[in-house]
Amino acid sequence: MREFIVEADGGSRGNPGPAGYGAVVSDAATGETLAEEAEFLGVVTNNVAEYRGLLAGLRAAHALDPTARVHVRMDSKLVVEQMSGRWKIKHPDMKPLATQARSVFPPDRVTYEWIPREQNKHADRLANEAMDAGTKGGTWSPATSRAALGTPPAVPEPSGPPGDATAGAAKARAALAESRAAGSGESAVAAGGRAAGAAPVPAEGAPPGERRLKTPSEPQPSGTGGETTSAPGWSSAPDLGAPATFVLLRHGETPLTPQKRFSGSGGTNPSLSDAGREQARRAAEALARRGTVQAVVASPLARTRETAGIVAERLGLDVVIEDGLRETDFGAWEGLTFGEVRERHPDDLNAWLADPGAHPTGGGESFAETAVRIAAAQEKLVAAYAGRTVLLVSHVTPIKTFIRLALGAPPESLFRMELSAASLSAVAYYADGNASVRLFNDTSHLRP
């Protein structure tokens, strides 16, 4: 079994401030550098940047050999102790990143070691190069980095027959580089749904018409049942098996929905209106035609249980209740319109719009707390429904949070998404920790 060394680092000039990460994968036996990763992250904290570096390094190692053992070396005592299980992870922005990092390789194949900063110079240099490039409006690339140093590529181009270890490593690095060059990172996906030049491929088990960006470590579905094929510019990745696919259905309308009133888990718990029940029936018919949903899981609130019940009856399935899927508690804002909240609680509203850790008036639940709850529910459900397609009937904030976490998007992205009643979205979770998202609000099933 191969063994890799992953060295990772992240930094933030201001904490939070302009941030970036760097990660290096090397062969434990030879010391040969096999892959370099770096990215400018925009404005985040130092710790978030360190976790993003860890995640990038693990994913790069997985792209080279998903069966390998990995030894992670970082100068971040916090990340090393938390990932080793000795310290608790309390920060809501780091919990989902740690969850993703743990899912890349089986935990028994990854070990962690703290090292002094002077022993982590390679990853630190990459992180600073990414920050330098990003603050100047550019993008870090391996070619630019090596040219600046005047050094040759870390691994030579393969000279042996296709499929040998060197060729596989080179192909994996080329795929990672092409992904970055094509703009298929989180920022590009969040901005436009798919990056220019990246070929979309069907996502198994997703609603009709779904397309997702292919990441280098994901299998390329061939339509022949589990085989993988190569596409130009992408590596021949290992077969990771069928993903856990969550088809996300927002509940149908309630009497509060057309009035755009805050309706969370701490309000009157309204049932569906007649229009909402009709929306649920049409969603049920659309899902029945698709024929891919294997289980139905719902939030415990009345409107989601009712929507889920209508769909599950049509599909011949039972409804499982998951408390983690409930809507955010909006405190004293429950039942009010946005304008009414601005008139009555302007300071609290401004704080809430500016800070994901801020609470609605009267307590309630912050978006940061919601994110922690959704990340825990995601981890639980992915483990329970691995390889299956599951309908999750939930609410605006939880569904947006699933999408945000899958994209690695910042908390403020919640305010940049629109989610119609009874709309369908989907997220597929793969064995290497990657996720793919359907980035549009599908309500075609609502038309008569």
Image (cartoon, grey):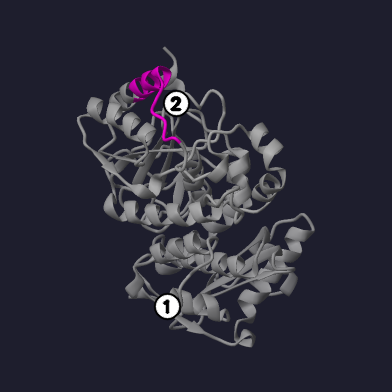
Q: Is residue 319 left or right of residue 331?
A: left
If the image is split into quadrants, where does the N terminus sit?
A: bottom left
User: What is the magenta range?
Assistant: 268-283
Q: Amino acid at mark 1?
A: Ser
Q: Is residue 358 left or right of residue 343?
A: left
Q: CA distance from mark 1 to mark 2?
A: 46 Å
In the image, 245 versus 47, the foreground residue is 47
Q: Is residue 346 left or right of residue 153?
A: right
Q: How many residues crowd mark 1 within 10 Å: few (<14), some (14–19), many (20+)?
A: some
Q: Which residue is under mark 1? A: 84
Q: Are marks 1 and 2 in contact (CB under 8 Å)?
A: no
Prevailing secondary structure of the magenta residues? helix
Q: What x and y, as percent, mark residue 118?
A: 64, 87
Dot 1 or dot 2: first in sequence order is: 1
If the image is split into quadrants, where does the C terminus sit?
A: top left
Residue drawn at point x = 53 percent, y = 61 percent? 92
Q: Secondary structure at mark 1?
A: loop
Give above or below for 64 relative to 150: above
Q: Is residue 146 visible?
A: no
Q: Which residue is under mark 2? A: 254
Q: What x and y, as percent, mark residue 386?
A: 29, 51
Q: How many residues crowd mark 2 within 10 Å: few (<14), some (14–19), many (20+)?
A: many
Q: What x and y, as percent, mark residue 41?
A: 65, 59
Residue drawn at point x = 50 percent, y = 36 percent? 263
Q: Amino acid at mark 2?
A: Thr
Residue drawn at point x = 61 percent, y = 31 percent? 337
